[in-house]
Image (cartoon, grey):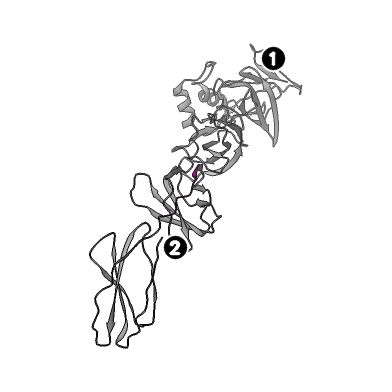
Amino acid sequence: MNEVGLEWSPIHEEKIVGYHIYRSTNGSSNFKKVATIKDRYASHYVDTNLKPQTIYAYTMSTYSKTGLESTKSPLASISTKQLLEPVSFIQAITNLPKRVKIIWRPHQYTNTTSYLVQKREIGKLEWKNAKEIKGRLSAEYIDLGLENNEAYEYRVFAKTNQGVLSKPSKIVSAKTKSLPFTVQNIQASNNIPKKIVITWNKILNDDIAYYKIYKSPTSMLLYTLLAKTKENRFEDLLNSNGETRYYKITAVDRDGLESEKQDNGTQGQTLPSPATPRIIEAKSDGYSVELHWVSGDNRTTSYTVIKEFDNQKQVAHNIQNRSFIDRNIQNGVKYSYSIIGIDEYGLSSQPSKQYNIIIPNPNETREYESSYKNDLTHQNNVQTEPTDKEHDMQNQNNSNDEIIIEDDTITQNKPISNQDTNSPVEIY
C-alpha cells in the first residue's frame, strides 16, 4: 500500500559508478529523481512512504566517475495496493458524565497494530487526533475531561505495522450528559415553632439519586451544606424563636452530577415569640392590687403574671383573661408585676414593662396618693386593645412606673385561684 520494490540487472562495467532512479505519479511526464545508488553492484531499491491505490512509473540511468549520465531505461509502472477497508462497526455511547465512549469491532487485517481516533466539534471541518490506541484487539476509547452537555463527532482509522492507515470509519456523534434540572418552587415555613420546614417540587426523573440542602444565615453569605435527602421535604430544627435562614436546593443524579443552585435563596423563619402584653391599668383599694392589660397580638391564648418582692418571686400560670387581682399584699413592701403572653405552642413573649407598687405603713403620710393618681391618669379604666399611638408611647417610655399605695389593712395569705373569663383573677 505504501511501498514499491525495484529490481534490475546490474551493469559490471568499470566506468559505471552507480544508478539514478526517477519516479512520476499517476501518468505524469514529470519525473523526479528519488534515489542515487552509489554501487554498480546493487540490484534492489525500495521506494517508501507512497500513497495507497496510486500508479507510479519508474525509470533508471547509470552515471560515471566524471558525472556523465546514460540515457534512461524504459518505464516500469505499478500501482500500490488499495487502502484497508474501515472497521466494520463503530458506535458512540452518549449521555455519560463529562465523557464520551467510542467502541468498534477489531479490524480483520492481521497486521493491524493500532487505531487512530479523531474527533471534531459539531459543525467544524477540521479533525484533530484524539488518541492512538495500541493493539489490534483494543477496540475502545473513552474521551475524558469534557464539559457537560457538549457534542462531538468521532471517526477511527486502523493502522498497519507499516504505518498505513485504513479508510476512515463512518462518523459517529455523541453528547455528554446534561446537569439535572434546577430544583423549582422552594418553600420555607415561617409559622412553626423551633423549626423551618422546607419543601420543593420533586424532579420526575428516575436518574435523580438525592437532593442537597444548603443554608446561610443571610442571603449574601456563603451557603454551606446542611443535609442530603431523597425526599422533597426537610425539617431544619432550630432551638430559637424568630430565627431566619436562607436555603438553596440542588438535585444530584446517579452519576454524581449536581444541578445548578438557585440565583437567590429562599427565606424561612421559626415562629417568633408572641408580642409582649402591655399593662394599661394598675390600682389598689388598700386591700389588693388589681392589674389590667392588653394582649400583644391575637396569637396569645393565656398569660403568666410574675410578682417579685423581697428577693422572692411568685408566678401565676394559665390565666385566660386579661385582668388580675392580688390580695396577698403587705404594708411597707415594694411589689413588682409583669405579664408574659403564651401562645398555643407554649412560646412565651418577653415580659411586659414592670410596674412597681409600694404599700406604706399605716402611720405614714398619704402624700403619695396624688403621685399614684397622676401617674396612671392617662391609663386608668382603659380595658380595650391599645392603639398604634399607645404602642409608640410604650416604646418611648422604657423606665418602670412606681405606683405608691397606702393602706392600713393586711390580709392573711391564701392560695392563688383563677376566676372565670369575665372577672379578674385574684390571688389571696
Q: Which residue is mark 1?
A: 419
What residue sits 76% from the left and 22% below the top?
415
* 323 lies above or below 139: above
**Residue 91, magenta (yes or no):** yes
* Kind of residue at disc 1: Gln
* 159 lies above or below 388: below
- Secondary structure, mark 2, is loop
**Residue 7, magenta (yes or no):** no
- Is residue 163 at all visible to an observer of this figure? yes
Q: Position of residue 37 (x, y in %)?
A: 34, 79
* Kind of residue at disc 2: Gly
Residue 283 occupies which quadrant of the picture? Answer: top right
What residue sits 36% from the left and 79% below the top?
10
- Residue 417 vs residue 258: left or right? right
Q: Which residue is mark 2?
A: 163
Residue 378 versus residue 321: which sits nearer the camera?
Answer: 321
Q: Which quarter shows the C terminus?
A: top right
Please state which of the two labelled residues, at mark 2 or mark 1, is closer to the viewer: 2
Residue 98 versus residue 328: which sits nearer the camera?
Answer: 98
Q: Residue furthest top?
A: 422
Q: Position of residue 95 (x, y in %)?
A: 50, 41
- Is residue 329 at all visible to an observer of this figure? no
Q: Position of residue 372 (x, y in %)?
A: 55, 25
What residue sits 24% from the left and 84% below the top?
67
- Residue 349 vs residue 79: left or right? right
- Secondary structure, mark 1, is loop
Magenta segment: 83-94
Q: Are marks 2 and 1 in contact (CB under 8 Å)?
A: no
Residue 361 occupies which quadrant of the picture? Answer: top right
Q: Reading the chain from its start, which is encountered first: label 2 or label 1?
A: 2
Q: CA distance from mark 2 to mark 1?
A: 106 Å
What residue sits 69% from the left and 28% below the top?
315
